[in-house]
Image (cartoon, rainbow, N blue to C red):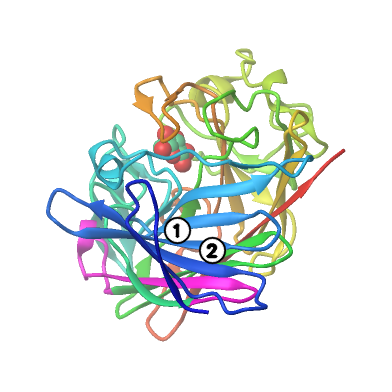
Amino acid sequence: MRKQQVSAGTLLVALSIATAGEAAEVNRMDFGKLADGSPVEIVELANGSGVSAKIMTLGAAIYSLNVPDRNGKSADIVLGYATAAEYLAKPQYFGATVGRYANRIRNGQFELDGKRYKLETNDGPNHLHGGLRGIDKVVWKIDSVKAGSPASVVLSHVSPDGQGGYPGTLKMTATYSLSDKNELTVEYRATTDKPTVLNITNHSYFNLAGDAGSSDIIGHRLTVFADAYTPVDSTLIPTGERRNVAGTPFDFREAQTIGLRVRDGRDEQIRFGRGYDHNYVVRGQAGTLRPAARVEDPASGRVMELLTTAPGVQFYSGNFLDGTTVGKAGRIYRQGDALCLEPQVFPDSPNQPDFPSARLDPGKTYTNTMVYRFSTSR
Ligand code: BGC
């Protein structure tokens, strides 16, 4: 079946390319224009079990993610803006693919093969999420879309040599696939023509209560499959230590309610982050897909498991959401309204010889794969 749909709202034309009998379908739709006239598109992946994901070409971002609760009622569990233009006007990395180096680099500087590189400093003294024009702020190209199970979309972007101060032309793809088992897989791949450093991740803000912003995530229960985390200084740069979580507010080896310790002002690390804003050392072998975290909203019953191939995962409890952003459902986002779990190499790795390397050489392919698996609890 190949059909054209015209939807009622601002989303103009949808091209449905599902074939009869296939569980999952793909719709392509226009999503307005940026101030410079560039068109933004959305590709929607939908399966037959009530899960659907809208992927936006601006920032190769997850624009919305609808997931059923324990009664089968689907709701959007990620934060975002109503229009594409707002993503550039006030970047908060909602759902975005971030890089070239996600997270922080101390003083925006690093050395590679004896040469010092200077990046933009856009977070106090540090470099954050690729600087002023990171890969979240460019419109990615749609390379292909595929219906069926999994339904998928491949986006690509080429970041020129020297962009934001980084060496090497970086060719990247972001592949989003939705299976009929309610798994959304995101795979980032990149190659370079000069030695460089990179760290590409997805920066979705989750709130499993749905229709993001209607309540906070303080009652969500979190498990992080990690025995250690990397403590930071007051500018949120790791000190280099791997600290055992035992006996600290960072212990999520067993499921814990986030709100229990997020305000524990006796802990300097919680004070530095104004809550959780820390990288965990995920148990097991980096490069193999293994559990990183599990989040459960006891009220709706929605459960999200995150699997990763990355060495670490940043847990951020939405501490800097300050009520100045109106989200796509017309609500303002306040502190603790969502949480991020960002699979990645550790922050500031280019300056930390004991951390897993963030280096990519010509002839090699970088990959970072993450799976968000959805189910419900009783
Ligand atoms: C960082 C936070 C930062 C946020 C910006 C997170 O990945 O850890 O410190 O404020 O991104 O959206």
Please tell me in which quadrant of the rendered image residue 378 appears.
top right
- The kind of residue on which mark 1 rests is Ile
Q: Are marks 2 and 1 in contact (CB under 8 Å)?
A: yes
Residue 356 or 375: which is nearer the viewer? Answer: 375
Residue 225 located left or right of residue 17: right
**Label of residue 55 in the image:** 1
Is 40 rendered above or below residue 123?
A: below
Q: What are the residue bounds of the magenta stretch?
A: 146-169
Image coordinates of residue 79 in percent, x first then y, are 48, 38
Q: Is residue 254 left or right of residue 108?
A: right
* Residue 202 visible in image: yes
How far apart marks 2 and 1 lie (CA) works out to: 8 Å
Report the mark closest to the observer, 2 or 1: 2
Mark 2 CB lies closer than 8 A to ligand 1: no
Residue identifier under label 2:
45
Tell me, yes or no, whether the highlighted magenta stretch contains residue 158.
yes
Image-based side of 32 in relation to 152, left or right: left
Mark 2 secondary-structure assignment? strand
Quarter of the view holding residue 160? bottom left
